[in-house]
Amino acid sequence: MISYLEPQCLIQEFYKRDKRSDIYSLGVIFWEISSGKPPFERHSHLDVIVKIMKKERELPVQNTPVLYKKLYTKCWDHDPKKRPEIESVCDELKKMTILERNNTL
């Protein structure tokens, strides 16, 4: 579960999670959907913590649509202030759905 925690939870013992925390986790889940596997599945908890703190994330999976990659990388940004609001995430997903239907994604 550590892979889904935003960096701030690992830095500050009493960090108060908020909706930006959920957006971070959602970005990780989006990556997992495209990869078909859990993030950092072959790493120890300590390795995962170090990677997250060093701003390292899983690499995008080959052939993942560019807009989808951009969306999940915005969601898991190290800086909570740079993460999108859920409304923006939904808008991006709707846009991708329309583009997919038109075969332009």
Image (tube, helix red, strand yellow):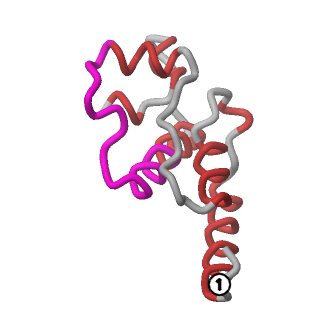
* 92 versus 38 height, above or below: below
- Lateral position of residue 24 relative to residue 13, left or right: right
Q: Secondary structure at mark 1?
A: loop
Residue 5 x %, y %: 43, 31
Looking at this view, is 87 or 7 the one in front? 7
The image quadrant of residue 8 is top right
Looking at the picture, which amino acid does disc 1 mark? Asn
**Residue 30 within the segment the image draws in magenta:** yes
Looking at this view, is 22 or 95 the one in front? 95
Residue 63 x %, y %: 53, 60
**Residue 22 within the segment the image draws in magenta:** no
Q: Residue at x 35, y 15 (%)?
A: 47
* 73 versus 13 height, above or below: below
* 95 versus 54 height, above or below: below
Q: Residue at x 39, y 52 (%)?
A: 35
- Lateral position of residue 99 relative to residue 72, left or right: right
Please count the marks in the image. 1
- Lateral position of residue 73 relative to residue 1, left or right: right
Residue 95 x %, y %: 70, 74
Q: Residue at x 63, y 66 (%)?
A: 90
The image quadrant of residue 24 is top right
> What's the magenta region?
27-46
Residue 37 x %, y %: 31, 48
**On-image quarter of the N terminus:** top left
Q: Residue at x 47, y 42 (%)?
A: 25
Mark 1 crowd level (few <14, some 14–19, many ≥20, 10 Å Cα): few
Looking at this view, is 11 or 50 the one in front? 50
**On-image quarter of the C terminus:** bottom right
* Residue under numbered circle 1: 103
